[in-house]
Image: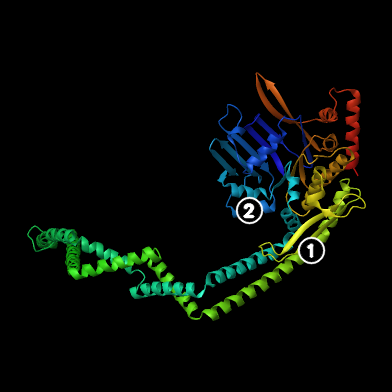
Amino acid sequence: MLQSLHVKNLALIEEAEIELKEGLNILTGETGAGKSILLGSVNLALGAKFDKEMLRTGADSATVELCFTSNPVAKQLLAEMDIEQSEDGNIYLSRKMQVGKSVLRINGEIVSAKQVKTLAESLIDIHGQHEHQSLFQKKNYFLFLDDFCGKELLPIKEQVSKSYEECRECERKLQESGLDEHQRAREQSLAQFEFEEIENARLTEGEDEELEARYQKMIHSKKIVEALSECYRYTSTDSERGAGSAFSRALREISTVTMYDETLGKMYDQLTELDDLLSDFNHDLEEYQKDCEFEEEDFRETEERLNLLNHLKEKYGNTLADILSYREEKQKQLEMYANYDAYMEQLNAQYEKAKQHYQKECDALTKVRQKYALILQEQLRESLVALNFLSVQFEIRLEKVNTFSANGQDAIDFFISTNPGEPLKSLSQVASGGELSRVMLAIKTVLAGQDDIDTLIFDEIDAGISGKTAWKVSEQLHQVSKKHQVICITHLPQIAAMADSHFLIEKSSRDNVTSTNIYELSEKQTMEELARLLGSDELTEAALSNAEEMRKQAFQVKNI
């Protein structure tokens, strides 16, 4: 769950920290106090777009820090990201934001926005103010249903996606190969030319490197020979000034005294070894000088061969291996053109086989979806009844379509009827804003029972509702909070009364500076806030009595 939220220098918040609890956490405050800023700060910590206008006036940077308790899925993700666990086992997400610069961290390590998003999906689910509008888009219905299907659907969806890509590959090959006779002749002629150009070059892998080294040696041969000649003069025995001659004289001199001391004998042996090494060096030097001798024709042939190889690299690949691979492609292409009819027949057969396999996998996908659609629609109907849809029908309809996609061949729609005698109609066409909010809450409630996400955030899920319906929404949030931490921003007293922990967000001004603060309310303060939400300008005994009655009613629901 989300244990704490720390915000600094964001919008009107100079610095605020909130310690959240298990169960139902309610956040209330006057309009404009900064409730949306608080939720926005959570989104920023999870990688949402940062704008310089979000910085508090006068500040050059803003910081948001979240602390979550871990869960098995999150631990596994941290291991896969090679991020160390914190000492206390919690997960710390933070973001420091400056103009033109932003740094995200997990447990103190700098990470990418993608990594944060991946981890956050296992920790928290945020329902924004306008998220219910996603119910107008049928493509989102797949997300809800497939999430509800859970692990049983995942391997089947992977197979469908794989089969779909195989079909796409077959289609691509058919499109590339489906040329008319004139185009085919032209392509065949070009392939033949390219194949022969490479084939006639008689390439050998690695020869370009050998030729380049030899060529460099040739063009610098004069300088090399001059340097080696001087070197030989200084090290050989052919010159009185050469090191070889000096070594010979030194050996003769020391040999006359070795009999007088054992140490002198060892020194003589060392000098002998050095003389042998110098002789070997001079021998190698002579051989290398011979290798530097070449005919003018050798140089011309080497240069021409290198030019040919570089020409082929410019046309067919950066390396000889690339060029040889290109030649193999052209050879296969020529074989295809030589047996074009048989090749096309084979391609069509492969495509038909891939389509059959894809459709078989799609049928398996549809079967699982249909099974869970019946369960989901009943659970949603029950949840909607609990949300004061007294006479509601709800149906999930799957229809087979002929289009191909990585998501299968299903079309999906949610149908609803909220009044007796009215026919079922598409949810995207008939529901009002308040109804959509409750439908979305029902969906979130049902799906919450299917996943391991600990924390759910609802930003004004109560939009467009009031009275008894608000109580029903409140009760539903309480039910969800039994298994999940729920954080709810609301303006309705019916929902606020159900709080396990109640936090007030308020705006204050001092010395012409405006700030947003947040703090947890005591039970007495909760009563006063409920009275305010009930519309009381003054904390009269009647207003407080109404608030107390509402709180008692909420406690009765909790104790059932």
Reply above or below: 126 against 379: above
Q: Residue furthest top?
A: 511
Left or right of residue 527, residue 5 in this image: left
Question: On the image, which quarter does residue 224 sit in?
Answer: bottom left
Pointer 2 or 1: first along the chain: 2
Q: Which residue is mark 2?
A: 77
- Report x, y in % for residue 15: 65, 30
Residue neighbourhood size for the residue with mark 2, other residues' Cα within 10 Å, grouped as few (<14), some (14–19), many (≥20): some
Question: On the image, which quarter does residue 415 sit in?
Answer: bottom right
Question: On the image, which quarter does residue 68 sit in?
Answer: top right
User: Which residue type does callout 2 highlight?
Assistant: Leu
Reply above or below: 377 against 390: below
Element marked by disc 1: helix
- Quadrant position of the C terminus in the picture: top right
Q: Are marks 2 and 1 in contact (CB under 8 Å)?
A: no
Q: Is residue 276 visible?
A: yes
Left or right of residue 282, residue 379 in this image: right
Left or right of residue 262, residue 5 in this image: right
Q: Is residue 442 visible?
A: no
Residue neighbourhood size for the residue with mark 1, other residues' Cα within 10 Å, grouped as few (<14), some (14–19), many (≥20): some
- Report x, y in % for residue 338: 48, 80
Residue at 68 percent of width and 33 percent of height: 17
- Report x, y in % for residue 333: 47, 74
User: Which residue type does callout 1 highlight?
Assistant: Gln
* CA–CA distance in space, label 2 to label 1: 31 Å
Label 2 or label 1, whichever lies nearer to me, is 1
Residue at 83 percent of width and 57 percent of height: 395
Label at residue 370:
1
Element marked by disc 2: helix
Q: Nearer the viewer, residue 188 or 486?
A: 188
Q: How is the image coloured?
A: rainbow
- Quadrant position of the N terminus in the picture: top right
